Image (cartoon, grey):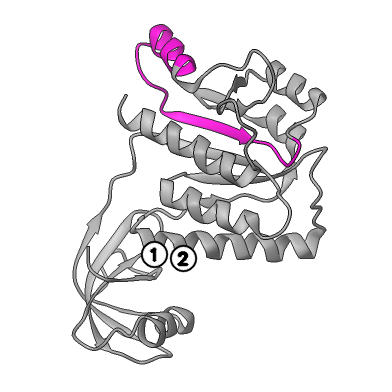
Amino acid sequence: MPDFRAFCSPSSAEPASLTLSTEESHHLVAVNRAKAGDTVVAFDGAGSEWICELVDASKNAAVLKVRFGQKMKRLPFDITLGQALPKGAYMDAIVRKATEIGVAKIAPLESERTQVHLDGSRQDKKIEKWQTAALEAAKQCGNPFVPEVLPVQGATAFMESTRGYDLKLIASLQPGARSLKTVLADFASVQGRAPQKVLWLVGPEGDFTPAEMSTSRSCSFEPVTLGPLVLRCETAAVYALSILSYELQNA
């Protein structure tokens, strides 16, 4: 993969050249030190890529000459992460790692034990920040699809609104939670295939409340154990997504 990647949303599906935004130009030229003649992969975050040559290394409006375009394939599975908001800046890291793992959507949730509560203006700024973090992670790891960060919503309301998933999982510390391998094996034995669209919920510090877990059961979520140790929520999110992605890639 070429060293340089830049985000761009051209007005044409087959552009001859691309002019990057000020932010992307600065990152490419001033931060990454790209020079005229270097190969740059421009991508729109929705699967389209253009292999380009940097012809004008302006820090404000870099210009790329398109050599050819290509449409990238999505992963054969679609994962949504429903993440109860953690304290501090941990959500930024979760968004970045989830992007590297290849999730399609990230739903930030306020649960009963969530200690972070965002009002309208602050929420908008946070969503913008997390979407930027997803874009930066996609550039770094070569993911041509930037996950969508959904508006913050209540965990219970989110559970009750979930439709269209093959399988819905919730990380659980409670007795009776099963291993992911067992849950996937049971799904395959009934459906004759691996799930293609999966939702995984990860709770906050202190986990979801008993009432929230009861709601999850009524909404057909499968409680899944992440092992015998109590994981921090940011560790749990990365661990849960990693083992799920691994199992689905090898199904």
x%, y% of residue 173? Answer: 67, 25
Nearest to the observer: residue 71 or residue 3: 3
Range of the magenta residues?
A: 182-206
Question: Does the magenta run of residues contain 119?
Answer: no
Q: Is residue 113 left or right of residue 251?
A: right
Residue ID at (73%, 34%): 207
Nearest to the observer: residue 195 or residue 69: 195
Residue 89 image-quadrant placement: bottom right
Q: Secondary structure at mark 2?
A: helix
x%, y% of residue 122? Answer: 77, 64
Q: Is residue 113 left or right of residue 243?
A: right
Callout 1: few (<14), some (14-19), or many (20+) C-alpha neighbours within 10 Å?
Answer: many
Is residue 222 in view?
yes
Q: Secondary structure at mark 1?
A: helix
x%, y% of residue 49? Answer: 28, 62
- On residue 136, the disc is 2
Q: Is residue 216 above or below residue 111?
A: above
Residue 219 image-quadrant placement: top right
Q: How many marks?
A: 2
x%, y% of residue 100? Answer: 42, 52
Q: Decide: marks 2, 1 in contact (CB < 8 A)?
A: yes
Q: Amino acid at mark 1?
A: Lys
Residue ID at (74%, 41%): 205
Q: Amino acid at mark 2?
A: Glu
Quadrant containing the C terminus in the rendered view:
top left
